[in-house]
Image (cartoon, rainbow, N blue to C red):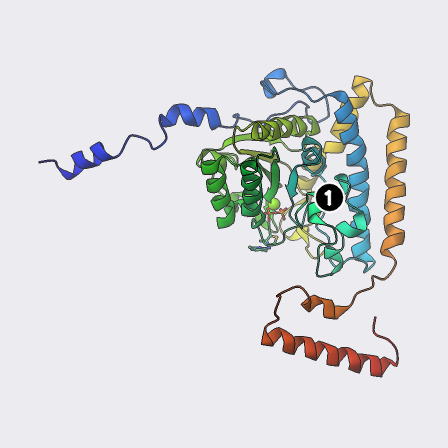
Amino acid sequence: MTTQAQQHTDDVPPTVNGDAGTAASRLLPSATPIRFLDDAGGVAPAADHGAYESPPLELLLEAYRRMVVGRRFDAQATALTKQGRLAVYPSSHGQEACQIGSVLALRDTDWMFPTYRESMALIARGIDPVEALTLLRGDWHCGYDPVATRTAPQCTPLATQSPHAVGLAYAARRRGEDTVALVFVGDGGTSEGDFHEALNFAGVFKAPVVFLVQNNRYAISVPLAKQTAAPSLAYRGVGFGIRSEQVDGNDPVAVLSVLRHAVEAARAGEGPFLVEAHTYRIEAHTNADDASRYRDDAEVSAWAGRDPLNRLEAYLTATGVLSDEDIGAARQEAEAFAGRLRTRMNDDPDVDPRALFDHVYAEPTPQLREQREWLVEELAADKDDSGGEHQ
Ligand SMILES: Cc1ncc(C[n+]2csc(CCOP(=O)(O)OP(=O)(O)O)c2C)c(N)n1
Ligand SMILES: [Mg+2]
């Protein structure tokens, strides 16, 4: 007769998926974040980037140019909130290496699943900036065509874009396509159930997905230490059997190198990859937030000292591939980009509030029908009061 303890030993193998120690060591991130550049843009010791390869200089120059435009775009969008032209804008100032590095690591046929903070990545991907800002202007739709641009609508509910990305990637693989999906998630978003469910599904089904965790140290006012006790968010992947890495998110060379590696591994059928990028949100959460209530200036200036754009500029200049004229040309391009955006955003959008109800259900519910009637009545009353057309 077997005892209960013996039965347990007989029935349950030591690990479900083989030798856990060996398996885990293949998945583990490096002990410290991968970096190629030191904080000032000098060359970091080779040990800091291990086996990762530096991306071609041509690609780094392209990253630089897009980062200059991206930062200027970000400043312009922030200004548009102050002018009442945008309802809200979550800035990604300081996160340019992640915003641009992700786009440059992907092919046009790959998909991106952004959050509200990724407007800069959207424009780096070539999406019209006015279309990219449509949602943040207060419209009911996302402005751009997600299928044509291979870019899902920017997601405000935290982490819900993660299972979408996994589903799309898995479906593409089943159809024999070599599409990779890259999903952005914040440090706060990694606490959400959707994120964990997406990781598990991706791990089990080997979906070609790259999870890019931008750890910018805060979820609105909640600092990382109150979000998790994990040594690094990169370890979140290991528990789901997913290869994981951590990278200096303010080092554009490192971000590009690690993301290119992750994307190509996923494309080659090696399964999903999780990359934690250590970075910092220099501005407040959005224009509706006062960051001075939960963090001090010294912390912000310490991170400003690791500015991704300054680091890349210093590195490329020292390498001899970026001249003062090139820097001037990039800044001029950025100014022109911002100027065109300003002009176009100063035109009032042509919005029909009734359209809000058009695409919710094929057959509107009685409640929605009633609400639409109220709106039509209000619009008519407004028109009578003002004696003019409602805009
Ligand atoms: C499911 C859900 N819960 C709460 C919120 C409210 N919320 C909006 S942004 C945010 C913080 C998210 O922080 P993080 O994931 O670190 O992204 P970051 O804003 O720093 O880029 C919260 C809690 C939300 N949008 N969705
Ligand atoms: Mg955050």
Tell which of 176 and 386 is nearer to you: 176
Work out whether residue 188 can be spotted: no
Residue at the spot 66% in from the left edge and 22% down from the top edge: 36
The local crowd at label 1, few if under 14, some if 14 to 19, many if 20 or more residues have their Cα within 10 Å, is many
Q: How far across and how far down the image is residue 161, in percent? A: 58, 48
Which residue is drawn at the image coordinates 87% and 51% (left, top)? Answer: 342
Residue lying furthest front? 175
Residue 27 in the figure: left or right of residue 292:
left
Q: Quadrant of residue 215?
A: top right
Q: Quadrant of the N terminus?
A: top left
On screen, residue 243 versus residue 258, left or right, reads left
Q: Is residue 56 left or right of residue 180?
A: right
Residue 6 visible in this rendered orientation of the protein: yes
Q: Quick check: 194 above or below 83?
A: above
Residue at 80% across, 79% down: 382
Seen as rendered, the residue at the extreme left is 1
Residue 229 in the image: state x and y as whole percent.
Answer: 47, 41
Locate the C terminus by quadrant.
bottom right
Residue 198: image x %, image y %? 50, 44
Going by the picture, which residue comes out furthest to the top? 46
Secondary structure, mark 1, is helix
Quadrant of res 345: bottom right
249, above or below 391, in the image: above
Instruction: Where is residue 101? Give x, y as percent.
Output: 69, 33
- Above/below status of 144 relative to 351: above
Label 1 sits on what residue type? Answer: Leu
Q: How many marks?
A: 1
Q: Mark 1 points at which residue?
A: 122
Q: In which quarter of the image is residue 287?
A: bottom right
Foreground pick, 290 / 95: 95
